[in-house]
């Protein structure tokens, strides 16, 4: 039985939960992180010295870093769902490219705006910092818009892949943040291909359970 350590409100934990659903995997989950058992606990640090969620336990095997966990799950348990992480090198490279882009460029851009406007975190309430974050986030969302205009479907191409899990969660946070920013009069670019993509994702049970579930 797969065990996932981390609170369900974490976007990185949600990646893993959604991937498990796409792969039809049974799992258990323990709440760790802010508001629950602290990740500074020695028992947790023995599993992940970075004190970050999620952590995956698959029998005696322990793994951290959410995108790495997604790849591991698809490699180990995804024989019946080969499109999720394609074996062909160039198709797989596109999946990896967009997963890495989400973890670096996109994630870095949206964090101050989301944390300040939606989470109202004390460290992210600077108006200039939020405005700069929204502008950077919008630029990266336009990159995503261009990609989705070309594929007319999903980030990796015609089929849903692992890349759509982290990016789909980020798109959810984009729309949630715009709800708050729009109330404050902030303008947002029109992204029709992203909107169509979001509609496609909402048809997936894993997305409804772990992304479109009311959690900010």
Image (tube, rainbow, N blue to C red):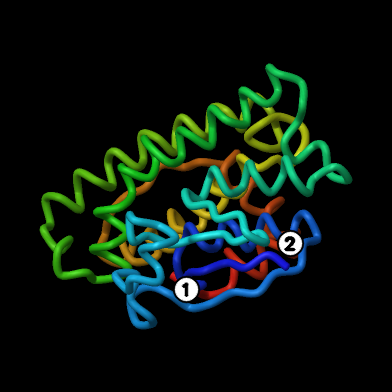
Q: Nearer the viewer, residue 161 or 45?
A: 45
Q: Residue furthest top?
A: 90
Dot 2 alpha-carbon crowd within 10 angstroms: few under 14, some 14 to 19, many 20 or more: some
Q: Position of 183 compared to 71: left or right?
A: left
- Which residue is label 2 attached to? 21
Among the two numbered marks 2 and 1 on one chain, the one whose residue lies closer to the N terminus? 1
Count of number-bearing discs: 2
Percent across and percent down for residue 66 are 51, 50
Q: Is residue 10 left or right of residue 80?
A: left
Query: Furthest-right residue in view?
Result: 80
Q: Residue at x 50, y 60 (%)?
A: 55
Instruction: Using the image, determine if residue 209 lies above or below residue 68.
Output: below
Asked if 209 appears above or below 73 in the picture, the reply is: below
Q: Is disc 2 in contact with disc 1, using a CB cutoff of under 8 Å?
A: no
Q: Secondary structure at mark 2?
A: helix
Corner quadrant of residue 123: bottom left
Residue 73 drawn at (x, y percent): 68, 49
x 48%, y 69%: residue: 6
Q: Residue furthest bottom?
A: 36
Q: Which residue carries the number 1 mark?
A: 7
**Residue at the (19%, 44%) spot, across then down:** 132
Q: Quarter of the image containing the N terminus? A: bottom right
81 is higher (above) or lower (below) than 27: above
Query: Label 2 vs label 1: CA separation?
Result: 17 Å
Position of residue 89 relative to residue 119, above or below, is above
Q: Residues within 10 Å of mark 1 (few under 14, many from 20)?
A: many
Residue at point 68%, 65% (across, down) = 2
């Amino acid at each position: 039985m797969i065990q996932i350590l981390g609170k369900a409100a974490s976007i990185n934990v949600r990646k893993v939960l959604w991937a498990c659903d796409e792969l039809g995997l049974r799992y258990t989950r323990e709440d760790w992180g802010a508001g629950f058992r602290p990740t500074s606990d020695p028992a947790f640090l023995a599993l992940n010295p970075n004190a970050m969620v999620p952590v995956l336990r698959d029998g005696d095997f322990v793994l951290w870093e959410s995108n790495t966990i997604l790849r591991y799950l698809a490699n180990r348990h995804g024989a019946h769902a080969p499109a999720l992480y394609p074996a062909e090198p160039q198709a797989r490279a596109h999946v990896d490219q967009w997963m890495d882009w989400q973890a670096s460029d996109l994630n870095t851009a949206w964090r101050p705006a989301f944390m300040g406007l939606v989470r109202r975190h004390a460290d992210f309430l600077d108006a200039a910092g939020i405005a700069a974050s929204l502008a950077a986030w919008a630029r990266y969302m336009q990159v995503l818009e261009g990609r989705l205009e070309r594929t007319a479907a999903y980030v990796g191409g015609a089929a849903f892949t692992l890349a759509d899990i982290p990016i789909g969660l980020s798109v959810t946070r984009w729309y949630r943040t715009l709800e708050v920013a729009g109330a404050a009069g902030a303008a947002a670019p029109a992204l029709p291909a992203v909107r169509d993509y979001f509609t496609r994702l909402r048809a997936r049970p894993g997305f409804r359970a772990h992304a479109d579930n009311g959690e900010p």
